[in-house]
Amino acid sequence: MEGNKKKHLLYYTWNGMMYRCYKKYHSHYKYYGAKGVTVDERWHDFWNYVYDVDNHLHDGHLLYEKGYDLDKDLKGGNTYSLDTCTVIRSLENQSMSREKQKKSILAFNENESIKFESLAETSKQLNINRSTVISCLRRGSRHKSGYCFKYVD
């Protein structure tokens, strides 16, 4: 069973999961490791992960094909493990991720405050470039329109 794990078809799925959870420099760490998402200790060993995917994970064989992802969110987990993961279509996973990361934005000035359901809606309704809204959010600065912005739940 042991061999060059980097040549194994599941290696990059496993490696991505580990990096998102434990490598602070990974671009998605802020959505995973920084929010307390972990990988079950058993799966820290690549070959245990492969064994479980091949022998115990329902539809695990689909992870060898393009278009499928390992997902921990459907079962409500904050940990990647055999008990908390399922296999879903990549498109479904991406759609769920976008929804989860969508944050409401409050635009306010001296006279009013307006709650928008997303960055896209804020940009469209106020006719302000998306990147400009992001800049104002990051800096806490006022836009030339007079609006300030903040994320709200």
Image: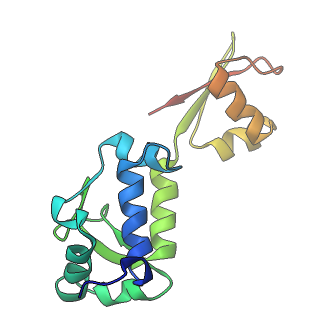
Residue 63 percent location from the top left of the image? 38, 83
Tell me if 142 is positioned left or right of 95 in this view.
right
91 is higher (above) or lower (below) than 79 = below
Residue at image point 80% right, 39% down: 129
Residue 70 makes an appearance in the image: yes
Residue 120 percent location from the top left of the image? 67, 46
Residue at image point 17% right, 83% down: 56
Residue at image point 47% right, 58% down: 97
Which of these two is toward me, 90 or 103? Answer: 90
Tell me if 28 is positioned left or right of 72 in this view.
right
Its colouring scheme is: rainbow
Q: How many marks?
A: 0
| Farthest residue, direction front | 3
Which of these two is toward me, 54 or 45? Answer: 45
Q: Quadrant of residue 30?
A: top left
119 is higher (above) or lower (below) than 72 = above
Quarter of the image for the C terminus: give it: top left
Residue 58 percent location from the top left of the image? 23, 84
Quarter of the image for the N terminus: give it: bottom left
30 is higher (above) or lower (below) than 79 = above
Q: Quadrant of residue 128?
A: top right
Tell me if 78 is positioned left or right of 90 in this view.
left
Residue 107 percent location from the top left of the image? 64, 26
Residue at image point 49% right, 55% down: 99
85 is higher (above) or lower (below) than 128 = below
Which of these two is toward me, 8 or 132? Answer: 8
Residue 57 makes an appearance in the image: no
